[in-house]
Image: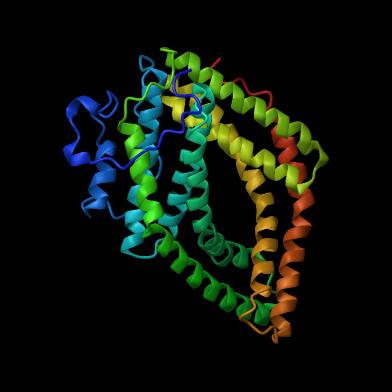
Amino acid sequence: MALKNAGLPIRPIQRDCMPPRVASSVAAMDDPRATIHSLVRRNLGPIKPVKSVPAHLSRSMRPEDAFRTTLLDCLAQITANAATLRAGRSVEGLHQLRVAFRRLEVALGAFGQEFDQDWLEELRGRAKILSGRLAPARDLDVFVGKLLEGSPKSGVSDGLVALRARAESARDQAWSAAAVCIASADFELFTDDVAGLASSQLPLSRDKRLPRAARRMLDRQVARVKKRGRTARSAEEGDMHRLRIALKKLRYTAEFFAPIYRKRKVKAYLKKLRALQNHLGDLNDAANVRRVVGDLLRDKGKKDEDVNMRYAAGAMVGWYGAQAPRAIGRALKRYNKFKRVSPFWR
């Protein structure tokens, strides 16, 4: 396979000087998202949160052109939301930026395996690192905006006020770190490298039929879900978390290829998949509370003299933890139903 393990460096491209012959057939499509990366770098793009939208794929595309179109789609979402955050704090903008990074990670993993191009893993690893630097701010957004509000307040209201104050202080620090990440050279070089790959004509695959390649990629994601599902019978939170991640990868891959299949079948499948993810998301709340509260109480810069706060923190962790067994049961029941859903690509 061409370029396998080549480890070729992906250099920032000079878009203004790039000869027309270098641009791929995908970039030449009438797709306004292909220009968003360049526009936001010059402060001309959208300054508002941007959600993912179906890529402009067609069944007549080659798999490698579909890959480049998907990269452009993910890159447009990343750079647009990064521009939003440079303009000011936006909870939704940060959420959509992390979604864009996860979608890009899945695209690089799925297409990289399909094309047998191991060197794409390096780019995927960089995406994970950047996304990880944004995670604390997002986790604290959810903690302050949702999880604290959802916990019972009877008998611990004073302690929760103190816990909220500490969480908001940590949140401000995390947002400062997120701003540094978005303004960093690492972030800029990464987005330029993705743009360079999306605009290149590197030979990546010998297969000329997109539906055939899409089916293989989707089948691999389903196989991973089934493997995680068998392990999740243990009803352990860690195993349920790994099932949730596998389902997320399946969902993003299904959304990538949705335009080349019948809309009605795709919609029905994704509706059931999202419902299952929601159940697993409820379970994930307990793990998030445990992790965030633990970090807040371990903060070496704070003196834990507020007994009420510590009591409220323990009560909150206990309350969410008590919901976990029931949430696991509901999620496993929903998963058993989902296993019988017919895939839209077969």
Does the rendering let one see residue 341? yes
Image color mode: rainbow
- Name the side, left or right, on which 93 lies relative to 232: left
Q: In the shown orientation, is residue 310 left or right of residue 67?
A: right
238 sits left or right of 178 in the view? right
The structure residue drawn at horizontal position 24% and vertical position 40%, both measured from the top left corner, is: 35
> In which image quadrant can residue 270 be found?
top right
Q: 91 above or below 268?
A: below
| Residue at horizontal 76 percent and vertical 59 percent from the top | 321
**Foreground residue, 185 or 104?**
185
Eyeballing the image, is 3 above or below 159? above
Q: Nearer the viewer, residue 171 or 147?
A: 171
- Residue 336 position in % (x across, y down): 73, 30
Q: Position of residue 61 (x, y in %)?
A: 36, 17
Q: Residue furthest bottom?
A: 305
Q: Position of residue 340 (x, y in %)?
A: 68, 23
Q: Is residue 94 above or below residue 248?
A: below
Q: Can residue 155 be seen in this view?
A: no
Q: Residue at x 39, y 58 (%)?
A: 182
Q: Position of residue 82 (x, y in %)?
A: 36, 54
In which quarter of the view is residue 113 placed?
top right
